[in-house]
Image (cartoon, rainbow, N blue to C red):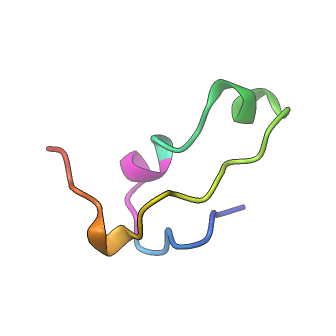
Amino acid sequence: MRPKATRGWTEAELARLVTRDCVIGTAVVAAPSKPASRRRTVR
């Protein structure tokens, strides 16, 4: 299940949204706080 407003994100960008609780199935990945077009890319 892909969070809203993450279309076009790379695997690395999506991975930053995943928490421990999401991995073990006790939480759902939350939508990002900033739209993709306004995020600062860290290289």
Q: Is residue 16 rendered to the left or right of residue 3?
A: left
> Residue 14: x and y, percent?
48, 51
Q: Which quadrant of the structure image shows residue 27?
A: top right
Magenta stretch in the rendered image: 9-14
Q: Is residue 25 rendered to the left or right of residue 21?
A: right
Q: Which quadrant of the structure image shows residue 24?
A: top right
Residue displayed at 40% across by 64% down: 9
Query: Among all residues in the image, which is located at the extreme left?
Result: 43
Question: Can you say which quadrant of the picture contains the C terminus?
Answer: top left
The image shows residue 28, relative to residue 20, as above or below, that is below
Magenta segment, prevailing SS (helix, strand or loop): helix
The image shows residue 11, relative to residue 19, as above or below, that is below
The image shows residue 8, relative to residue 31, as above or below, that is below
The image shows residue 26, relative to residue 43, as above or below, that is above
> Residue 22: x and y, percent?
72, 36
Q: Is residue 10 magenta?
A: yes
> Residue 3: x and y, percent?
63, 63
Q: Is residue 17 rendered to the left or right of residue 11?
A: right
Residue displayed at 41% across by 70% down: 35
